[in-house]
Image (tube, rainbow, N blue to C red):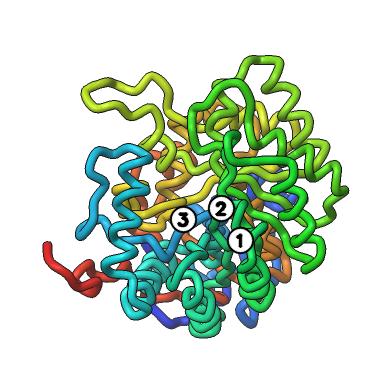
Amino acid sequence: MTFSFPAGQSLSGLLNASIPKDLLPSALAGSKLCDIALENGHIAEIVPAGQLPHTSGNVDLKGQMVWPCFADSHTHLDKAFIWDRTPNPDGTFMGALQATTQDREAYWTEADVERRMEFSLHCAYAHGTSTIRTHLDTFGVHGARVWPLLRRLQKKWAGKIALQGVSLTMPERYMGEDRDGIVRSVAETEGGVLGAVLMKHNTTEDALDVLFGLATEYGLELDLHVDENSETGGTALELVAQAALRHRFRHKILCGHCCSLTVQDDVAQIRIISLLAEAGIGIVSLPLCNMYLQDRTPGRTPRWRGVTLLQELDAAGVPVMLASDNVRDPFYAYGDFDMHEILQGGTRIGHLDHTSRPWVQSVNTRPGDWMGRNHRLEKGAVADLIVFPTRNMNEWMSRNQTGRTVLRAGRIIDAVPPAYETLGGDL
C-alpha cells in the first residue's frame, strides 16, 4: 500500500514503520516495527511501535519501510543525458571517451549543460536523494564556466539537494601553468574537492606530491578516479595510499572505481588494502557503470565485471560506498539517478546479500558522513525520509519502488521524475 496524504502536507508521525536493521538507532536494535514522531521538520523520537497515538497527522504505515534520504557520492552531472544525440559507438571505454569529446565540442554551451544538470537534479530529488557530489570536466572553455554554473545551482537547489563539486582532470594539469586557476575554482566553491584521473601508467610520485601539496595548501579533500581498467602488475591505488601516508595527509581521500585491484595477485591485494586502511582512504564503487564498460569485446561474453573488491575492503575496515556515476551518457547508457537501482544492482553484482555487513548504509549514512551530511535515522535529524511500499529487504530488492513517497523536512513532496521531452532534441 501507499498512503494518500496530499503532497505538501506536514506529518506529525509515522506509525508502524519497518526500518532496515542496519539503519535502526542502536537503542532500538531488534525492534520489528517503530513509531517515528516528527516535529518542526525534524525527527523528535523513534520508539517501538504502539507508543504514538492514532491521531490526525500520524499516518499508519502498516509495516512499510522508512529510510533516510539517499546520498550519491560520485556522479557526472555535466555529462548526463547526452546518449540520445551522441551514443557510445561500441560500448567500450575508448568509445565513451571519443563520443563524450565529440559531444562536448559540438553541444556543450552553458545553456545545454545547465539544462541537463537541472534535469539530473530533478530526477535525483524525485527519487529521494538529498546530497550529491558531481565530478566536473575541468579543462578548456567548459572547465572555466562550469564552476560558476555549479555555484549558481548550489544556491538554487539549497534546501533540496546539497551539491558538491570535484575537479575532473589529468594529474599533469596540476603541474602546468593553469593549476592555480583550477585549484582556486575548487577552493572558492562550497564543498569543492580536488580531483584527478589516475591510472598506473600516468601516475608518478612527483605528480602525486604536487597534487597532495596543493590539497594541503588550500585545505581541500581529494576525490580521485583510480584504475578504471583491467591492468595487471600494479595499481595507481597503491601509489595514492603511499602518498597519503608519506604526506601525513589530514583531509579525506575518496578513490572511485579501483577496478584493476581485482586482477592483481593475492599478495598485492592484501598489501594494497592494508595500506588503504592505514591511510584512512574511502572507496566508492560504481557497479553499474563498471559492469557496462569493463571487459567489453564485441561478440564476446565478458569474463570479468569490473567491480572492485567490495567485501574484502569492507572486511579490512575501509569505508565502502556505492554511487550512480554516469547516467545516460557514453560511459553508461542507462540509469536515472535512482540510488535504489544502485544498491539493488550492486547487491546482485557484488554478492552483498547473505552477509551480516551493513551494506544498506552504503547509499545513505556512510556517503552522507563522508560528505559532511547527516543521513541517519536519529533524534534531532532533519526528517528527510523515504517511505517504500515494502515490508522487508527482499521485497525492497525485488521491485523498482516507483511507488515510494518522499518526505523532506517532514513534508510530503510532489516531485516526479521529469519528462524526457523537457530535455529537447530529437528522438
Q: Which mark is residue 35?
A: 1
Image height of 4 relative to 375, above or below: below
Position of residue 142 measured from the top left corner of the image (x, y, whole percent) = 43, 71
Question: First in sequence: mark 1 or mark 2?
Answer: 1
Q: Nearer the viewer, mark 1 or mark 2?
A: 2
- The residue under the point 61% across, 68% down is 178
Q: Residues within 10 Å of mark 3 (few under 14, many from 20)?
A: some
Left/right placement of residue 83 relative to residue 341 reads left
* Residue identified by numbered label 3: 62
Position of residue 258 measured from the top left corner of the image (x, y, whole percent) = 57, 36
Q: Is residue 56 visible?
A: no
- The residue under the point 57% across, 67% down is 165
* Distance CA(mark 3)–CA(mark 1): 11 Å
* Residue identified by numbered label 2: 170
- The residue under the point 24% across, 71% down is 423
* Secondary structure beneath label 1: strand
Residue reaching furthest top?
266
Q: Which mark is residue 357?
A: none
Of 330 and 398, nearer the camera is 330
